Image (cartoon, helix red, strand yellow):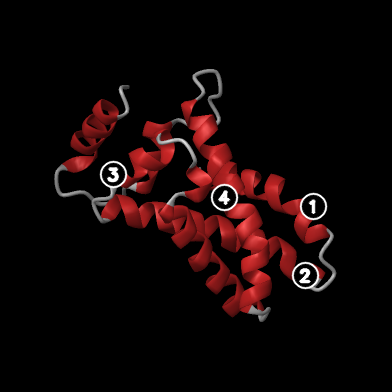
Amino acid sequence: MFDNLLQLVKEHSGNLLGNDSSIPEEHKEGIMQTATAGIMDHLKGLMSGGGIDKLKEMFTGGDIANHPEVSNMTENVASDIAGKYGISQEQAKDVVSKVVPNVMTNLAAKTNDPNDHSFNLQEMLGSLTSHASEGLGGIMNKVGAMFGK
């Protein structure tokens, strides 16, 4: 899943980062990987913290770009990038606020499109869940029921 998500991040940040001369060239690939890891970590945190309802809302509720969890994700990713690559918090947030909402909107569209098999919601959620007291099968059954799958 990381590779598919990284590809989405590259699609939505490549031109933006490529045209930003204030970000050193040697950091651009790392910034995309850090953004991808930040998105994954946030989604994993929701899964492990019992946020299945929030995930359902994000992926089926409409305007994902303005969802509070996407805003939180954007803030966290910007902080990670600023700290790791020595760019200002404002500059990192400027880049990330243009990338993360678009990536999440595209990810939701792909998971909800029955003809697009690049992201399967149940498989995605399964890959985000590494530890579960009731077992992955029980969680996936609940998730599948919630999403009508």
Instruction: Tell me which residue sits at (65%, 76%) in the image.
Output: 85
Query: Gap in Å between the C-alphas at discs 2 and 4?
Result: 24 Å
- In front: mark 2 or mark 4? 4
Q: Which residue is mark 1?
A: 15
Instruction: Tell me which residue sits at (34%, 57%) in the image.
Output: 45
Q: Which circle's residue, 2 or 3, is located before the other in the chain?
A: 2
Q: Which residue is mark 2?
A: 26
Q: Which circle's residue, 4 or 1, is located before the other in the chain?
A: 1
Instruction: Tell me which residue sits at (55%, 30%) in the image.
Output: 118
Residue 36 x %, y %: 56, 55
Q: Which circle's residue, 2 or 1, is located before the other in the chain?
A: 1
Seen from the viewer's position, the closer of residues 62 and 13 is 62
Three-letter code, disc 3:
Ile
Query: Gap in Å between the C-alphas at discs 3 and 1?
Result: 33 Å
| Residue 52 circle label | 3
Q: For the residue carrying disc 1, how many other residues have a C-alpha within 10 Å: few (<14), some (14-19), or many (20+)? A: few
